[in-house]
Amino acid sequence: GAVVSQHPSWVICKSGTSVKIECRSLDFQATTMFWYRQFPKQSLMLMATSNEGSKATYEQGVEKDKFLINHASLTLSTLTVTSAHPEDSSFYICSARGHGHEQYFGPGTRLTVT
Amino acid sequence: KQEVTQIPAALSVPEGENLVLNCSFTDSAIYNLQWFRQDPGKGLTSLLLIQSSQREQTSGRLNASLDKSSGRSTLYIAASQPGDSATYLCAVIYGGATNKLIFGTGTLLAVQP
């Protein structure tokens, strides 16, 4: 149980375009989902926290207008990178939490902006 | 500021050796502490979760300890194997409405056959 999927697993896009990444909890209802970013050889940095049906809470330094998060249902959250630039190239990982405190992580999405 | 630090940053050991990875955190008012494994280009695999009221957790060859008062946790790996090679991350969970995870800097482990 407690499986989280992400789609796509990798994506290449051109600079200036937008990319949407999906995070789904497959076998449980996720009241809260988290989005992390990981640059090469670095640890995970929390970008934002989203609760179903409400606006996401962004960490300091993360542009909410650039990284749009929508937590439309208890099993789906999406992260849209708008007007992507090469510096947005990174590994994006989501996690989902049900009624307990443990977070379950997705397999990650590798974004490359050319 | 809540920070999590892991030492060493990288470690190379011969197969069969026992080893210890260290994690320290600046704010001892944690809710839980969790150890993860990350293979290159992959997501996270949860290894052990220690609640703040616990001192240690064990799973197979892994043993994680927690000392809240000193702000430290260790991950002990017994009889290491080449398949244990990965990056190990510790993460601290603080309480409150969001229960955010704050990740450490990671230890890159290489077990030589």
Image (cartoon, helix red, strand yellow):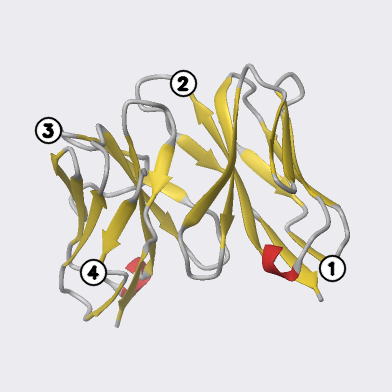
Q: Tell me the crowding category of disc 3: few under 14, some 14 to 19, or many 20 or more residues within 10 angstroms, Cα based.
A: few
* Marking on residue A53: 3
Please give left or right for residue B72 compared with residue A43 in the image: right
Q: Amino acid at mark 4?
A: Ala
Mark 4 and mark 1: Cα distance apart in space = 44 Å
Q: Secondary structure at mark 3?
A: loop
From the top left corner, tell me how far across and down residue B55 is, in percent: 72, 23
* Marking on residue B15: 1
Residue at figure coordinates x 66%, y 29% from the top left: B26
The chain under label 1 reads B
Q: Is residue B67 visible?
A: yes
Q: Amino acid at mark 3?
A: Gly
Tell me whether marks 1 and 2 sit on the same chain: yes
**Residue of label 2:** B95
Mark 2 and mark 4: Cα distance apart in space = 34 Å
Q: Is residue B24 above or below residue B6?
A: above
